[in-house]
Image: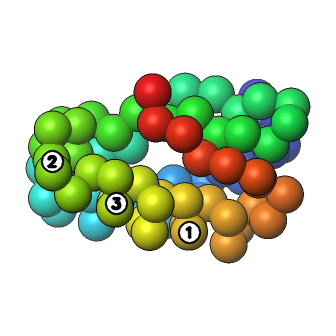
């Protein structure tokens, strides 16, 4: 696993307990060389009406704070 991918996974680890408390989770799918992270919201997060906000304000913020070179976070 690349250093960048490891750092993104660690960032996700900081937000994962909050998602799991609501019956959801986030799975790292890939990190592209151009700095795009692909994640999948699972469990309750996968069908939650607030999933877009969770992705933007929770997951994206956690990743970008820990790994500033990340340009974008996309849900797949």
In the image, which disc is placed on residue 54? 3
Residue 57: x, y in percent?
44, 69
Q: CA distance from mark 3 to mark 2?
A: 9 Å
Q: Residue at x 34, y 62 (%)?
A: 53
Tag 2 residue: 48
Which quadrant is the C terminus positioned in?
top left
Front residue of 47 and 19: 47
Which quadrant is the N terminus positioned in?
top right
Tell me if 16 is positioned left or right of 28 in this view.
left
Tag 1 residue: 61
Marks 3 and 1, the one that precedes in the sequence: 3
Residue 66 lies in what quarter of the image? bottom right
Q: Are marks 3 and 2 in contact (CB under 8 Å)?
A: yes
Q: Residue at x 77, y 30 (%)?
A: 32
In the image, which disc is placed on residue 37? none
Q: CA distance from mark 2 to mark 1?
A: 19 Å
How many dots with numbers?
3
Disc 3 crowd, CA 10 A, few/some/many (<14, 14-19, 20+): some
Front residue of 34 and 3: 34
């Amino acid at each position: 696993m690349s250093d960048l991918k490891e750092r993104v996974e660690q960032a996700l680890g900081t937000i994962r307990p909050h998602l799991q408390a609501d019956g959801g989770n986030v799975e790292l799918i890939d990190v592209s060389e151009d700095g795009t992270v692909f994640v999948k919201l699972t469990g309750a997060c996968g069908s939650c009406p607030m999933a877009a906000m969770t992705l933007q304000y929770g997951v994206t913020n956690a990743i970008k704070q820990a790994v500033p070179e990340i340009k974008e976070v996309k849900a797949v």
